[in-house]
Amino acid sequence: MSGHSKWATIKHKKAATDSKRGAAFTKIIRELTSAAKDGGGNSDHNARLRTAIARAREINMPANNIDNAIKKGTGELPGIIYETVTFDAYGPGGVALLVEGLTDNKNRTTAEVRNILSKKNGSLAGAGSTAWMFAKKGFISILKDKVSEEKLMEVALEAGAEDITSEGKYHEITSDPANLEAIKEALKKNNIPVDTAEITMIPNSTIRIVGAEAKQLLDLMEALEEQEDVQNVHANFDIPEEELEKISQ
């Protein structure tokens, strides 16, 4: 679990620059369009769309951009149709990777993902090779100095959380994806600020990675995330805090 939280923190820091924000806009627009196409344009009845809208608002995407992306998904406006793609892969240290994307050209995306993996000490694996190691969950992280573990447990478990752990600087909540919004709302009512909230793939177990392999792994994940068709990269690593500090310097 801690590996997931650490990677989310790294991504958020990197997304602070204008160029990264532009890339984030592109990815979320695709997610909005795809979610609306698959589940309709009414966020009250489409949890995936509701989550995508929340993410768009977090990075200050203009409301007009959000609306247009949704309308392209429902067919009210013309737009590109994106196909969901998933790649199973392995990275340095035998870390399992699950790469999710949205693309208008699967052959192009497959070739580009394979190229990134080969250049960055990774390899593409057979379909389903790593997917079984992950479970779809609602995930929320909260800085420890914002709320006590006791208070958080009281609020989150009542709202439908499955598990709460406290590691490093964060409390981490996992839940059934359907309960994510209810938990977020309960936290908001209790003035508990959320650092990260998303529906994601959580590894069932983790592999401890240190030294050169840790840096290689983070370089690989960043390169994959920067590929325009890739929406999310999930991995089952756990890099110690002190190791992460050294890499970040």
Image (tube, grey):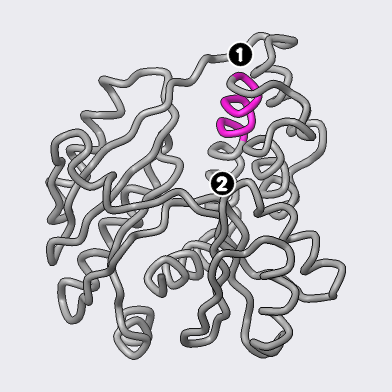
Q: CA distance from mark 1 to mark 2?
A: 19 Å
Q: Is residue 182 left or right of residue 174?
A: right
Q: Is residue 111 magenta?
A: no
Residue 20 x %, y %: 53, 52
How far across and down, in percent of the image, does residue 113 sit?
25, 38
Q: Which residues are magenta?
A: 29-37
Task: Name the quadrant of the N terminus.
Answer: bottom left
Q: Which residue is mark 1?
A: 79
Q: Which secondary structure lies at badge 2?
A: helix
Residue 84 sits above or below residue 115 on the image: above
**Which quadrant of the structure image shows residue 230?**
top left
From the viewer's perspective, is residue 181 above or below residue 42?
below
Choose between 68 and 239: the one closer to the eye: 239
Nearer the observer, 81 or 205: 205
Q: Identify the image quadrant of residue 148.
A: bottom right
Q: Main secondary structure of the magenta part?
A: helix
Q: Is residue 155 left or right of residue 85?
A: right
Q: Where does label 2 land, which residue?
A: 24
Looking at the picture, tell me which residue is in the foreground, 100 or 116: 100
> Mark 1 or 2 closer to N-term?
2
Identify the residue at horizontal 53%, vertical 44% (top origin).
Answer: 23
Residue at 50 percent of width and 70 percent of height:
9
Residue 208, above or below 227: below
The furthest residue to the right = 189
The image shows residue 32 at horizontal and vertical percentages of 64, 32
Q: Position of residue 196 (x, y in %)?
A: 61, 64
Residue closer to the observer: 99 or 27: 99
What is the number of callouts on the image?
A: 2
Give, as a three-letter code, the residue at label 1: Gly
Q: The residue tagged with tag 1: helix, strand or loop?
A: loop
Kind of residue sitting beneath label 2 = Ala
